[in-house]
Amino acid sequence: MNSPLEIRKVVVGIILSILWVSVFLFLPSSLVIDWAGDASGALTPFKPIVIVIGLLVIIFYHIFYRSSTETTKLSLTGVLTICWLALILFYPFKDPNNAYAGAVGFFTLVGGLGVCVLWVRYFSDEIFA
């Protein structure tokens, strides 16, 4: 017998992904960590560190929160959908100074196909012979 779907894991996964996307949008790139304390050159940008830590939190949450595999797959599909929608809505595709806009646009479209395939799996009816 299958274990029930735990909606709590899906909702928390989506909230974590929204918080992770908001780091990209609202955290200024000018923040730095001054390791020496006197601005002598030991500076590390703060935003990439927070992005990596947020991604690790999402990954470890899905690994260590015990639930059925279907619940984990559904939660990861929701996280991927949030990230894909944020990329479509907030990435500057039309910026003339952006040299990677074409490549990012192509992989965004391919990623959209992957998101559609994942959601079709959850919305399709199971046919038994």
Image: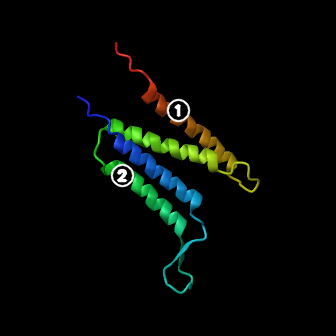
Disc sitting over residue 116 in the figure: 1
**Quadrant hosting residue 41:** bottom right
Residue type of the residue flagged with mark 1: Cys
Residue carrying label 2 = 61
Residue type of the residue flagged with mark 2: Tyr
Q: Position of residue 21 (x, y in %)?
A: 53, 53
Which residue does the image show at 71% across and 54% down from the upper left? Answer: 99
Q: Is residue 51 above or below residue 3?
A: below
Q: Position of residue 104 (x, y in %)?
A: 63, 47
Residue situated furthest left in the rendering? 1
Locate residue 36 relative to residue 63 in the image: left or right.
Answer: right
Q: Earlier in the sequence, mark 1 or mark 2?
A: 2
Query: Which element carries disc 2, helix, strand or loop?
Result: helix
Question: For the residues marked 1 and 2, what is the alpha-carbon distance in whole angstroms?
Answer: 24 Å
Within 10 angstroms of label 2, few (less than 14), some, or many (20 or more) residues? Answer: some
Q: Position of residue 92 (x, y in %)?
A: 68, 51
Which residue does the image show at 52% across and 32% down from the upper left? Answer: 116
Pointers 1 and 2 in contact (C-beta within 8 Å): no
Which residue does the image show at 48% across and 80% down from the upper left? Answer: 35
Q: Is residue 71 above or below residue 92?
A: above
Within 10 angstroms of label 1, few (less than 14), some, or many (20 or more) residues? Answer: few
Q: Is residue 38 above or below residue 119?
A: below
Quadrant including the C terminus: top left
Front one among 77 and 105: 77
